[in-house]
Amino acid sequence: MATPRVCVLRAPGTNCDRETAFAFETAGAQAERVHLFRILEKPELLSDFQTLCIPGGFSYGDDVGAGVVFASQLRTQLAEVIGEFLQKDTLVLGICNGFQVLLKAGILPGGAGEWTNRDQTERQSTLTWNANGRYTDLWVNLKSCSEKNVFLKGVDTLESPIAHAEGRFIVKDESVIADWEANGQIALRYCDESGKTSKEILDYPVNPNGSLQNIAGLGDPTGRILGLMPHPERFLFATHHPQWTRKNLTGEGAGMQLFRNAVEYFG
């Protein structure tokens, strides 16, 4: 099969698009950084890609809330083309600000099914201010909790850096989490160094933002969409880790597997 094409969709304020495109290219994809305004002018461009990635960064300066403006443009001006993209055998990845966008646009948690009824569906979850009330930048441990998510194939635990102020995952009604878990949609949880996690909120810094049930990533029912707060594109090689010499790390970093999985899905 031809090399899969990835649209790394950036908006004013996005600042992780180059690193994310590099990650996909290193994994074997053909990645293109596409400005949102190009898609607004010519929405059919999105049909040229097999994967849509919304990278981290501060889109529109997060002036009215993290990811809100970007999400609004997807939900309104690009509603039709996004709906068509989700209905196909495609992948969607949202990292940090991208995760915020996916949630606030209504792409997660329900994927294509929820998108079809987005005007009638009440948003069940969001990402809000960290429990410590400030921007937090550190490395965390993550436990993969979904066997169906394409991006997490073969992943058990991984380390990854986080850098955000609005990363605390909350829901309107906690009962929905049981349904998501049964569907394999709870993708990642914060865990300790041994890989141990729980549904009780772990203490800082293990859970860096106070997310409900330590949730760090969420998928859709098909497993083809993933949103996560940590930055896997910042741990592509062992030398990216701040303790790579102390831990005797070599070769690829743990984050690379997510991008390889996305490429291999189309193999």
Image: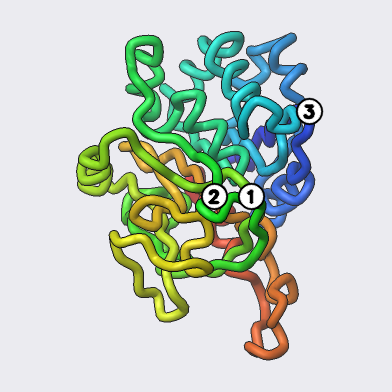
Q: Which residue is mark 3?
A: 12
Q: Residues within 10 Å of mark 2 (few under 14, many from 20)?
A: some
> Callout 3 environment at 10 Å: few (<14), some (14 to 19), or many (20+)?
some
Pointers 1 and 2 in contact (C-beta within 8 Å):
yes
Residue occupying image coordinates x 54% and y 39%: 99
Amino acid under label 2?
A: Asn
Q: Quadrant of residue 222?
A: top left
Is 169 or 229 nearer to us in this picture?
169
* Camera-nearest label, 1 or 2: 2
The amino acid sitting under disc 1 is His
Disc nearer the start of the sequence (1/2) = 2
Element type where label 1 sits in the image: strand
- Please say if 189 is above or below 94: below
Image spot of residue 189 (x, y percent):
40, 59
Q: CA distance from mark 3 to mark 1?
A: 17 Å
The reply to whether the C-beta atoms of the residues labelled 3 and 1 are less than 8 Å apart is no
Quadrant (top left/top right/bottom left/bottom right) for the N terminus: top right
Mark 3 or mark 2: name the one nearer the start of the chain.
3
| Rendered view: 235 above or below 59 | below
Give me the C-alpha separation between circle 3 and circle 2: 24 Å
**Dot 3: element:** loop
At label 3, which amino acid type do we have? Answer: Pro
Instruction: Locate residue 252: give its quadrant.
Output: bottom right
x then y, percent, for residue 247: 63, 88
Residue at which label 1 appears: 164
Query: Residue placed at 76% from the left, 17% from the top?
Result: 37
The foreground one among 79 and 24 is 79
CA separation in Å, label 1 and label 2: 8 Å
Q: Which residue is mark 2?
A: 130
